[in-house]
Image: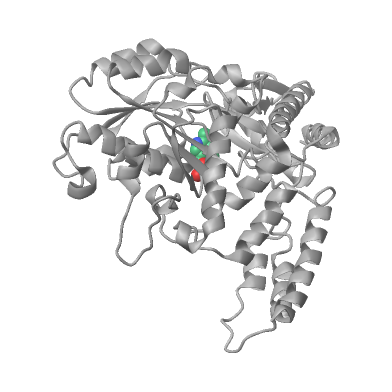
Amino acid sequence: MVSTFGPVLQQTINHALRYLESLDHAPVGATATLPELRHRLARPLPDVGTDATQVIDELVADTSGGILGNSGGRFFGWVIGGTLPAALAADWLTTTWNQNAALFACGPAEAVVEEVCGAWLKELLRLPLGASFALVSGCQMAHVTCLAAARHALLSRHDWDSERDGLGGAPRIRILSGSQRHGSIDRAVRLLGLGSRCVVDLPVDEYGRLQPITLSNALAECLDGPVIVLLQAGDINTGAYDSFAELIPLAHRFQAWVHVDGAFGLWAAASPAYRHLLAGVEQADSWATDGHKWLNVPYDCGYAFVANPSTHRSSMSHRANYLTHDKDARDQIDWNPEWSRRGRGVATYAALRQLGREGVAELIERCCRHAHSLAIQIGDLPGAELMWKPHINQGLVRFLDRKPHANSSDHNRRTDAVIAALMETGKAFFTGTTWQGQRCMRISVCNWQTNEADVAQAVEAAEWALKQE
Ligand SMILES: *Cc1c(COP(=O)(O)O)cnc(C)c1O
């Protein structure tokens, strides 16, 4: 039996190691084109099977050039993390064990692993220890989970049972949010049947932060109905934090539910140097964050936390005759939106053990240091301009058209051209954004592997790109 697995798994280890070892020098972007990838991968559906080892060998060959180097240290695009060794290995075991992490009965050890992860994460992120939690596929589904709890809590105050009666005829929930929120909030709102029109866009300051006066005026206009206030820990472009200590008590005076999007920014709580940015955040009603960004566990892993466990459980729990519910253990189905699911807690457990409290703090601080150094050094190059000096791990630069009387659209064009030239080098990976009406290059450092040499290579690549016309 084992021998049927042996050859293919050994071969897979070889492929995996070859890939991981290539990350230091291989082009960090894709080198294969869309037609090439389609040509290689879109084989006719086979009538007969193929030997497992051959399937894997051909899979590696056919995908080559189409796998980005985001597991390595030279990837600074979007907000994307890599994978810690223990997390990667634990993820392989999770797949090998193939437990259905829906119930304690279907995977006893994994149910306990998740229980421990929840407790560790609350401690590390300095959230209330009594909060309930769910390990979900990402921050988007963490929003869905938290906002489902919010919907339950707010509507039950109006004697409305949204789980039983749906939303038709229910009091309309309004969501007050800064206009620079992440799009995953809007998708969560759509999925929950609240409708994106329930989101009220509030103006933010130049950093993306909601001001107390703006929020209190908006709250004063919705005195009659249920309200959710959405705050941000880590703006996608600037990493800016809302002022939780002021805004949360204000929202609570109006009986609003406060939800915090902290996809990456909540992790600053793990570092003594940065946790002041999150002062007061523990007073919120729910929090959403990711494991697959800054903690560097493999994709799909996000975490939802809810201050009042009974609202969370009431919105998710399901009991069925054919299931085996445990009276002492934690059945994940009581907290998660999915039914059958992967034991995604195992990789988180392994990552937190590999790093420890100090290792997580160092990871956060190291990424912030490298982001700062990248932004300063690239921003200092002739023809470049620093637009946002990172507070945490997110910065912005742009590139200037040096012709006389160049206007804003010339600079925008130049910025996109330099990003494209930089990407051509394959030495570093950056993405663009439009911030305050101007094209910028984002600098985002989330990978545990990024080091001084990676930063130097990226700066060199930017210097080269700036010399191209
Ligand atoms: C990435 C991100 C999300 C969405 O997270 P997923 O894990 O992709 O679902 C939400 N908010 C912010 C600020 C993000 O950076």
Given the current orientation, which residue lies at the most extreme bottom position?
48
Q: Quadrant of the N terminus?
A: bottom right
What's the residue at 64%, 71% (across, down)? 41
Q: Is residue 363 at least partly visible in the picture?
A: yes
Residue sticking out furthest to the front: 328
Q: Which residue is drawn at 30% across and 15% down?
A: 253
Which image quarter holds the C terminus? Answer: top right
Which residue does the image show at 50% across and 28% down from the upper left? 127
Question: How many callouts does the rendering have?
Answer: 0
Q: Nearer the viewer, residue 309 or 77?
A: 309
- Image quarter for residue 388? top right
Q: Nearer the viewer, residue 34 or 174?
A: 174
Which residue is nearer to you in this view: 244 or 98?
98
- Image height of 414 relative to 248, above or below: below
- Report the front residue among 162 and 73: 162
Q: Name above or below for residue 285 compared with residue 346.
A: above
Q: Looking at this rendering, what residue extends furthest in the left direction?
A: 169
- Residue at 81%, 32% in the rendered image: 459
Percent x, y of residue 380: 78, 20
What's the colour scheme?
one colour
Q: Residue 351, located in which quarter of the rendered image? A: top right
Can the viewer see residue 418?
no
Side of 455 relative to 86 (left or right):
right
Above or below for 418 versus 375: below
Q: Position of residue 102 (x, y in %)?
A: 45, 58
107 relative position to 51: left or right: left
Task: Name the spot of residue 316 as percent of width and height, x first.
Answer: 34, 48
Q: Where is residue 205 in the image (x, y as percent from the top left)?
A: 47, 16
